[in-house]
Structures are given as C-alpha cells and as structure tokens.
Amino acid sequence: MQPDMPDNSFLKSQGRIAALLGRLAADPPSCLLLEGGTEQERHDLSLYWAMILNCRAGNGPCFECRPCVQVRDEVFRDLYLLGPGQKINIDQVRALRTIYTQKPHFTWRVVVISEAHGLRGPTANALLKSLEEPSPGNSFVLLAPQRESLLPTLVSRSFILILNRKTRITYDEKVEAGFAELAEFSRTGRGWLDRTSGKDSFDLDQARCIVSRCKHELMGSMLRREPGSLFSGLSPQAGYQVLRVLKKAEFCLGLNYIRVDMVLEWLAMSLWKRLCRG
C-alpha cells in the first residue's frame, strides 16, 4: 500500500490542483504561484511539486523513493524553503543567485517562498531579477493567499494556480474601514479626499488590499447579483469598465516611487464618476 504523507488531506481538498501539477511536470514553468486555499495547503502542494519533479518513479510522487521521503521531511538538498516564520531579506534572495546558477544535485531544484506577499522593495526586486534570468533545472514557487498582495511584475512572470477556497477572504479592520469610506464617497462624493490627504492615510500594503477588496466586491456582485453591494445594478459593460479602473490602480501601486494618496484619490474619483454620476 502506498504510504501517506504526514497529512495528505490536501490531496482531497485540492485534488484538482495536484492533478494540474502532475500535468505541468512535462514542461515545468520557471515560476509557479499557488494562490488561495490555506497556508498549510499551499505549503503541502509546494512539497508535492518538488516530489513530482524529483521522484525516481517518474510518474508522480511514489512517497517511497529517497527524494520523495527527503522532500517530505524537508531535508532534500535541492529544496530551499524561505519563510514562513522568518522575514525574507534581500541577502537570502541574492544568495540564491549563486546557488541556482549551478546544476541541481538531483533533477530539479525547487525554491519555495512562503507567504510571498511579504516581499517588498529591494527584496522583491532582487527576486524579480532572478525570475527574469531563469536557469535550467530550477523552479520557484511563490505562495500567497491572493495575487493582489504581490508585486504585479512578480505575478506576470508566474504560472498561476488558484486553490479551492473554503472561507471568504478577510481583511483587517483598517482596510475594511477604508473600503467603507471609499464606497460612501463613490455613492455620495463626500469624505474620501480628506481621508487620503491626512496624516492617517493608508500605506502601500493597505492601498493594495483596498483595491483587492473592491475587486472581490465587484466579482461577487457580478456573479451573485448581491443587493446592497457597492456595485449592484451595474451592467456587464459597466462592470468591465470598473474592473479596468481597478486593474489600472493595481498597476500604478506596483510602480516604484508611487504616491499612494494620489492613486487612491484617482481611484475614488473614477469610481464616483461611474457609480454616482452614471
């Protein structure tokens, strides 16, 4: 009988993704982004991917050969795990460049960056440079609850797999409060501009989350026609126009040296014109 991993529940809850990973092994992308699910499921699937690429059986994880067992125990020489529980710094990412230019010890070297949404500034840019110059036999795996929290340039260089979600995405209190204020301005034209220009404005991470919150509200409204939603009553064409606005704001927040307050002000005015003024 095939032995189980310590906890193989992800094979049931995320069986579709596990099957897709098996198909991808024929031509592995240089960077995978596993989005959604739980933190544990993302981690387990990243190990599953490392097993697929290095299993001696050659047709998916056998869970018995030496590479599979070593990956399971996280002691495989070609497996590099960054985070969670530790802040990933630029020196760690730069050190990888001297490693992945060398031939893997076995078949594939897999670099897993857990909770990649924590990457910011020079660290994210150093990783981006690595992804722009992929070396044969290396696969990066980025793990994040949602892609909106990553730099758009990292997302654009990744093959994205979306895990099944068991629970609704949640945001912290300040993001929810900011979304509520933005929604009120979009309906009435009052309040938001004073908020973004004050000293208690939003930082870059919070701004990205507010845009993400808007996108999820829009998708929920378009798919389920939820009454009372900020975007309820929009035609498909109007919904597409709002989505373009949100994607543009998302793109601008990914640029270097961007003024967060100006992006949020532009977003608020754009939504107000489409929702309040029609």
Image (spheres, grey):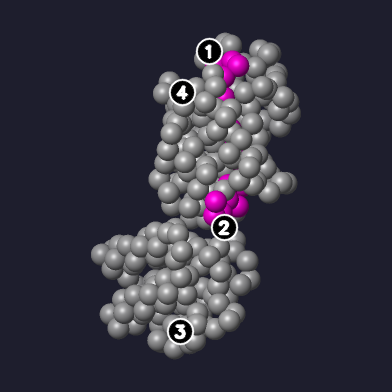
Task: Find numbered disc 2 in the image and state the secondary structure of the residue it sits on.
Answer: loop
Q: Give how far apart the Cα atoms at labels 4 and 3 are.
A: 50 Å
Q: Amino acid at mark 2?
A: Ile
Whichever of callouts 4 and 2 sits on the residue coming sooner in the sequence is: 4
Task: Find numbered disc 3 in the image and state the secondary structure of the residue it sits on.
Answer: helix
Location of residue 164 in the rendering, given as x and y in whole percent from the top left corner: 53, 44
Task: Find numbered disc 1 in the image and state the secondary structure of the residue it sits on.
Answer: loop
Q: Decide if residue 137 is on the left or right side of residue 99.
A: left
Which image quadrant: the N terminus? top right
- Local crowd at mark 2 within 10 Å, few (<14), some, or many (≥20)? few
- Local crowd at mark 1 within 10 Å, few (<14), some, or many (≥20)? few
> Which residue: 30% across, 83% down?
277
Residue that badge 3 annotates: 193
Q: How many numbered marks appear?
A: 4
Residue that badge 1 annotates: 58
Location of residue 6 in the rendering, given as x and y in whole percent from the top left corner: 74, 28
Would you identify the image quadrant in which residue 201 lies?
bottom right
Whichever of callouts 4 and 1 sits on the residue coming sooner in the sequence is: 1
Residue that badge 2 annotates: 169
> Which residue: 52% across, 26% down?
101
Q: Give how far apart the Cα atoms at labels 1 and 3 are.
A: 59 Å
Q: Amino acid at mark 1?
A: Gly
Residue that badge 4 annotates: 136
Whichever of callouts 3 and 2 sits on the residue coming sooner in the sequence is: 2
- Compared with 176, 35 (above or below) is above
Whichever of callouts 4 and 3 sits on the residue coming sooner in the sequence is: 4
